[in-house]
Amino acid sequence: MSIRSILEDVVTGRISIDEAEKKLRFLALELVNNSVKLDIGREARRGIPEVIYAEGKTIDDLIKITRRVLENHGRVIISRVNNEQAKVLEELFNAEYAFNFYERARMIVIKENSFRVEKTGRIGVLAAGTADIPIAEEARITAEEMGCEVIYEYDVGIAGIHRLFPALKKMIEADVSCIVVVAGMEGALPSVVASLTDVPVIGVPRSVGYGFGAGGIGALTTMLQSCVLGLLVVNIDNGVNAGASAALIARKAKRINKLA
């Protein structure tokens, strides 16, 4: 739910002014149990839905936050979920809502069966190796929940660089607005991709590797030191931010194309 979508519903007569006013009131900060402040209006302000970070939260707090976001928005996105949290949430919400647990990405999306997302554009997501897939999946799911069509290819790292070219060709032909590239170890793949395309590339260092530069430090350093222009870098393992940022770029590109 965004301010724009609410106004469009008023113009087309799908909702009344009173109903629109009620929806707009939901787009505010809301207190949950005097300890958690939900930013209900984030999606309206920024076009990015609030993503609940499950790691470190008690199961009780997670349930309360999930329930409140569902009541206000009809959808909730949860990241970094463990199996115990996923099991409890599924038992509570699976019967009433559409429940999807993406185990590899450690993400859950719960939504009303009637919930629909406005289509916002097209992006690409690449993972260098299979160990990078969980973070690539974070980016993919986040972007899809923001309305993007996502073209993705995994295990296309520079150790066998011939694997990259068919995947990249597919994305170029699909006219993606941005490409997210996840890579661990030396983290060279984003620079290669950025040197071959004319769209923004978002590099995501992955905490894969050992010895000097372990924990994603080597990959992060490589990406930050890249001499290729047009490469942007998020923090280590931050697939959610990469997916959200790519979706914002795609949304803006789609709006500009409509005006052209």
Image (cartoon, grey):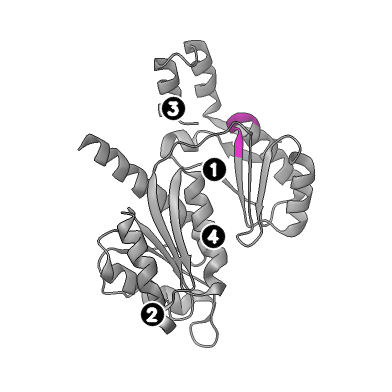
**Mark nearer the N terminus (2 vs 4):** 4
Q: CA distance from mark 2 to mark 1?
A: 37 Å
| SS for callout 4 | helix
Q: CA distance from mark 1 to mark 3?
A: 17 Å
Q: Tell me the residue that label 4 is attached to.
A: 137
> Who's the residue at 55% across and 73% down the image?
130
Where residue 7 sits: x, y (%)? 41, 21
Q: Tell me the residue that label 2 is attached to.
A: 161
Query: Is residue 34 visible to the viewer in this orientation of the structure?
Result: no
Marker disc for residue 130: none
Where residue 89 sits: x, y (%)? 74, 46
Q: CA distance from mark 4 to mark 1?
A: 18 Å
Q: Tell me the residue that label 3 is attached to.
A: 5
| Contact between labelled residues 3 and 1, with CB atoms less than 8 Å apart | no
Q: Quadrant of the C terminus?
A: top left
| Contact between labelled residues 1 and 2, with CB atoms less than 8 Å apart | no
Q: Is residue 154 magenta?
A: no
Where residue 154 sits: x, y (%)? 49, 68
What type is the residue that disc 4 sits on? Glu
In magenta, the rendered stretch is 71-75
Q: Residues within 10 Å of mark 3 (few under 14, many from 20)?
A: few
What type is the residue that disc 3 sits on? Ser
| SS for callout 1 | loop
Q: Out of 2 and 12, give the one closest to the viewer.
A: 12
What type is the residue that disc 1 sits on? Glu
Q: CA distance from mark 2 to mark 4?
A: 21 Å
Marker disc for residue 50: 1
Left or right: 116 in relation to 120: right
| SS for callout 3 | helix
